[in-house]
Image (tube, grey):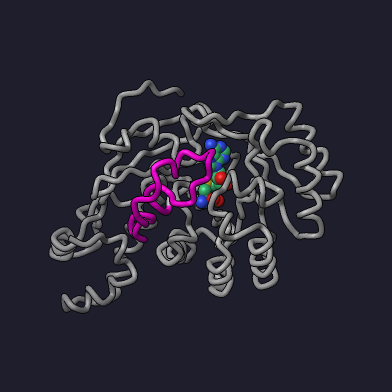
Amino acid sequence: MKHILAEIENLPQWLAAQGLPKFRAAQIQRWLLQSRAQSFAEMSDLPAPLRQQLDRDFQLWTTTILRHQQSEDGTEKLLLRLSDGGVIECVLLRDGPRRTICVSSQVGCAMGCVFCASGLNGVERNLTSGEILEQMLRLQRLLPADERLSHIVMMGMGEPLANLENVTRTLAIASADDGLGISARRITISTVGLPPAIRRLAELDCRYHLAVSLHAPNDELRDRLVPVNRKIGIAAILEAADEFFAHTGRRLTFEYVLLDQINDRPAHAEELGRLLAGRVALLNVIPYNPVAGLPYRTPSNKAIAEFREILERHGITVKFRQRKGDKINAACGQLRRQTVDLSTGTLVNLPVSG
Ligand code: SAH
């Protein structure tokens, strides 16, 4: 059976093949993306035979919710099991009027960042566009009827630019007025920095926001923290990012996870300030969210303040991201790691905080 969320663009053809009018496609799409239907049966303005036909030919949900966690700050996290047994996570963040969702692009990750929970067991596969959209719809349905999703960040598990086709296909639906209606300016693709894919994304002219995970001011340190850097190098990434800015006019974001004693020293801040000076860019500094079993720690408040002061002296626009949802393991890959024995794929009953 086909996944209807992976077939939305093909619905007019499917209807034509059934000898049915194509305008039904817009109705079905509205039920799925805007009216938050949970089943075909409730699509009350469709003829009953069509609803039955949809039910015979398509699955609406391909995932099952293994866990649903809520924290006091309004963050909610879903752990989802895919039809082939793979496990992914996605998050809803509430920040003032914003309703931001953080979505996964792959099962696991191949990039190998040493501090991150997602890639500890490598990558299993790319998510389909339907599975990426399903995360968005699962999170949307957690909102009360009078609230809408406002922002999307591709900052869940996986490297979105390693699954560029499925990611951009889903984001086209998310950003369309007759889709989820989330404007491209409010959609961020976060990448470890893959220059050819950054260029391809720029050429698509889709006006998404690009965030590059830098995490180190020089290749010697970045090679250690982000192993995929050994084949790429910071200079090539900055060149592609600058081209993205030149092409799209969208201000770049650089992300920097602060790891105690590793990349948080005053000398690192100085070097980072020199590296980024002169760019129209925002530096997003994220205090590390500790992962069980990994040796990395969050820096002291004093080290964080000093890091910030040095960068501001260099004229860099710096934002220190508030930690949200850390009590529910909202950082990339953490909940999955805590809940699922990755060697067997079975749920293990570990105590869950928050
Ligand atoms: N592959 C993409 C998306 C990863 S998740 C990328 O590399 O950008 C988004 C951000 O969260 C990345 O900057 C990633 O390095 C960071 N991150 C991963 N684990 C983290 C942790 N435990 N604490 C804080 N940030 C983390």
51 drawn magenta: no
- Residue drawn at (35%, 31%) of the image: 339
Q: Position of residue 112 (x, y in %)?
A: 49, 47
The answer to whether residue 343 is left or right of residue 52 is right
Q: Which residue is at the front of the view, 186 or 286? A: 286
Q: Position of residue 133 (x, y in %)?
A: 38, 56
Which residues are the magenta region? 105-133
Q: Which residue is at the front of the view, 201 or 230? A: 230
- Residue drawn at (74%, 30%) of the image: 303
- Residue drawn at (57%, 73%) of the image: 205
The answer to whether any part of residue 144 appears in the image is: no
Q: In which quarter of the image is the N terminus?
A: bottom left
115 drawn magenta: yes
Where 277 sits versus 100, above or below?
Answer: below
Quick check: which quadrant has ligand 1?
top right
Q: Which residue is at the front of the view, 18 or 353? A: 353
Q: Position of residue 229 (x, y in %)?
A: 58, 54
Q: Which residue lies furthest to the right in this view?
A: 313
Where 150 sits versus 93, above or below?
Answer: below
The answer to whether any part of residue 346 appears in the image is: yes
Q: Which residue is at the front of the view, 177 or 271? A: 271
Where 269 sits versus 152, above or below?
Answer: above
Figure quadrant of residue 188: bottom right
- Residue drawn at (19%, 54%) of the image: 41
